[in-house]
Image (tube, helix red, strand yellow):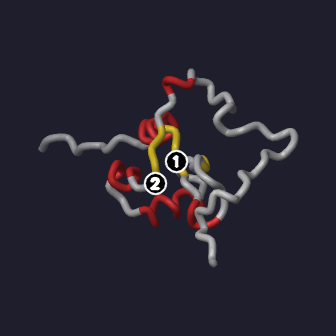
Amino acid sequence: MRRSKGSASRKPHAAKPGSTPSAIVDSGAPAADIKLIFKPELPALLRVSYSSIFSWMRQGRFPLPRVVGPSGGRSSRIAWFASEVQAWLASLPQRQLKPPP
């Protein structure tokens, strides 16, 4: 009989000695104030494709996400701090309007 991938017999991964779980890392804000933007929400928020966002991240022009789910493979869940995305938006140049004729 085959066991399914979600079998209860699997043991959870133990944290590496000396590592700090990401939920404990101090981001400078109280835990109640941390807002996350998950991958499916980000392209809708910015009105661009995820491939554009990924390209900006590779170029160092957009904040990198945090891994908030199981790490590794296609099942990992990533999210951005809303404050970092807001800071990125605020850093963009404002559009200049031509003076009236």
CB of mark 1 within 8 Å of CB of mark 2?
yes
The total of numbered circles placed on residues is 2
Marking on residue 69: none
Horizontal side of 55 relative to 94 (left or right) equals right
Q: Give the x, y percent position of residue 90.
A: 43, 36
Q: Residues within 10 Å of mark 1 (few under 14, many from 20)?
A: some
- Name the amino acid, label 1: Ala
* Residue 90 vertical placement versus 43 (above, below): above
Which residue is at a point 32% across and 55% down the rendered structure image? 47
What residue would you read off at disc 1?
79
Which residue is at a point 63% across and 30% down the rendered structure image? 27
What residue would you read off at disc 2?
39
Q: Quadrant of the N terminus?
A: bottom right
Tell me the quarter of the picture where residue 71 sits: bottom right
- Name the amino acid, label 2: Lys
**Of 81 and 71, the residue lying toward us:** 71
